């Protein structure tokens, strides 16, 4: 488990020596500073979990320092120590951002208890923030099923779950890579810290740079205020980079520095910041081939592929399809107040024999569409509309207008991954009109 980091600010060597020795023996990592200026620099670069600050320093007082530290990171608890305590001073320190005010000489055992309580409270706030940021949609157990392929994946994942080494999750689009990434976090030693995910394929180079590393005020034209990057948000937790193979090559060296040195710089900043994250990356690409073809940095590939977990395609574990289907149907039926929705034998057979180019994501979409449009408690083969068309033949001249329309709509639905709203937009019709056409075809059959 990651050790708690303390920033100790005091200009008396003897005081620092005694406190650091005691706290180190009790599981803390301690960084030192002797002045207001050093404290600001140490706070910015070391990213402590809590700071302990003597009131009187050579170049100022704690009352001057507190608001400056809060401006850098308002979430870090601050403890002020003074040899001349008073109620007025304590009230002023609390107003400026101190969580605790202690008089010197402080009992080290008391200080230890205070620090542990403050760190515990901070991590609890982080957990609540992470919980609020999670999507409401239920997530699937990444190991549903009993196929040899999925059992082998579970065995491998359980062995690496508690490691701090980077993990590369490979597999086809829609196979469940992001679900496995979250499972690694929630079952690992960093589960009480944030899980932050970012899709590298969805952002341009500049946006990815800013989202990942953050920026200082004035770093570029629209940077009207400083912004914390996702690396800082994920500190002590897990950073999940989905589709890392699409990361711009200009950003890759910066990520490598984070992995090797645990340091980074915000855009527009000249000082390094420390960060402690576990990286889980995912890709559907062959990064080994991409590195040989100079499309992905080989040094970054070797660093992120310390541990590789390959998620099998759904067609490689067809025997798991009924298990997954029943799980999705139970989830969907409950969410819509319809009770259990079941599969007729012909529907189950169709699901098992289909190739699933879109993998688990496509399976969910097919079932969700069937539940929405059918209204029945048992789904038959006629209720299932598969999203991909194995061979896209040219639209024939002998087809009727209705048949031409149906084939065109089916192709658009396939290209849009079964997403009705996006397909309707592409087709230039309303969502309700598209639903009506799909439902009508279901009742008439293929």
Image (tube, helix red, strand yellow):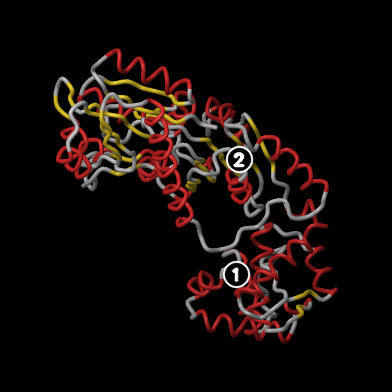
**28 horizontally vs 357: left or right:** left
Q: Position of residue 69 (x, y in %)?
A: 25, 35
Residue closest to the eye, 443 or 368: 368
Q: Is residue 264 visible?
A: no
**64 horizontally vs 367: left or right:** left
Q: Position of residue 383 (x, y in %)?
A: 73, 78
Q: Residues within 10 Å of mark 1 (few under 14, many from 20)?
A: many
Residue closest to the eye, 353 or 54: 54
Q: Which mark is residue 181?
A: none
* Mark 1 / mark 2, whichever is N-terminal: 2
From the image, tell me which residue sits under label 2: 188
| Mark 1: secondary structure | helix
Q: Is residue 14 above or below residue 43?
A: above
**219 horizontally vs 446: left or right:** left
Q: Quadrant of residue 245?
A: top right
From the image, tell me which residue sits under label 1: 413
| Mark 2: secondary structure | loop
| Distance (Cα) linking label 1 and label 2 | 39 Å
- The mark lying in front, picked from 1 and 2, is 2
Q: Position of residue 172 (x, y in %)?
A: 66, 49
Q: Is residue 360 above or below residue 10?
A: below
Q: Residues within 10 Å of mark 2 (few under 14, many from 20)?
A: some
């Amino acid at each position: 488990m990651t050790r708690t980091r303390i920033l100790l600010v005091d200009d008396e060597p003897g005081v620092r020596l005694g406190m650091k020795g005691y706290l180190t023996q009790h599981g803390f990592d301690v960084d030192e500073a002797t002045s207001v200026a050093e404290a600001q620099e140490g706070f910015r670069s070391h990213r402590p979990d809590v700071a302990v600050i003597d009131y009187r320093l050579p170049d100022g007082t704690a009352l001057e320092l507190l608001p400056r530290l809060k401006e850098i990171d308002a979430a870090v608890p601050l403890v002020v120590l003074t040899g001349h305590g008073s109620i007025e001073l304590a009230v002023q320190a609390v107003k400026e951002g101190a969580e605790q005010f202690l008089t010197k000489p402080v009992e080290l055992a008391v200080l230890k208890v205070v620090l542990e309580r403050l760190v515990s409270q901070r991590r609890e706030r982080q957990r609540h923030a992470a919980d609020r940021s999670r999507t409401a949609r239920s997530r699937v157990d990444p190991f549903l099923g009993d196929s040899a392929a999925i059992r082998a994946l579970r065995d491998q994942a359980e062995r690496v779950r508690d490691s701090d080494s980077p993990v590369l999750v490979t597999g086809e689009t829609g196979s469940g890579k992001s679900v496995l990434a979250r499972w690694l976090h929630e079952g690992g030693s960093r589960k009480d810290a944030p899980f932050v995910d970012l899709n590298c394929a969805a952002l341009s180079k500049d946006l990815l740079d800013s989202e990942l590393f953050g920026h200082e005020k004035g770093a570029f034209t629209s940077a009207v205020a400083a912004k914390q990057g996702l690396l800082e948000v994920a500190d002590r937790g897990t950073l999940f980079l989905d589709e890392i193979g699409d990361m711009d090559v200009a950003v890759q060296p910066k990520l490598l520095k984070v992995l090797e040195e645990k340091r980074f710089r915000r855009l527009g900043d000249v000082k390094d910041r420390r960060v402690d994250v576990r990286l889980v990356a995912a890709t559907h690409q062959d990064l080994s081939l991409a590195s040989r073809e100079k499309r992905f940095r080989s040094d970054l590939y070797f660093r992120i592929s310390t541990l590789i977990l390959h998620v099998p395609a759904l067609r490689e574990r067809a025997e798991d399809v009924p298990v997954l289907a029943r799980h999705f149907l139970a989830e969907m039926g409950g969410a819509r107040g319809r009770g259990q929705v079941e599969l007729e034998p012909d529907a189950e057979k169709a699901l098992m024999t289909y190739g699933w180019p879109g993998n688990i994501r496509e399976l969910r979409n097919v079932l969700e569409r069937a539940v929405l449009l059918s209204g029945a408690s048992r789904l038959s083969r006629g209720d299932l509309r598969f999203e991909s068309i194995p061979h896209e033949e040219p639209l024939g001249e002998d087809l009727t207008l209705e048949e031409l329309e149906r084939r065109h709509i089916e192709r658009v639905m396939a290209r849009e991954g079964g997403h009705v709203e996006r397909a309707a937009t592409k087709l230039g019709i309303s969502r309700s009109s598209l639903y009506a056409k799909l439902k009508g075809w279901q009742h008439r059959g293929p």
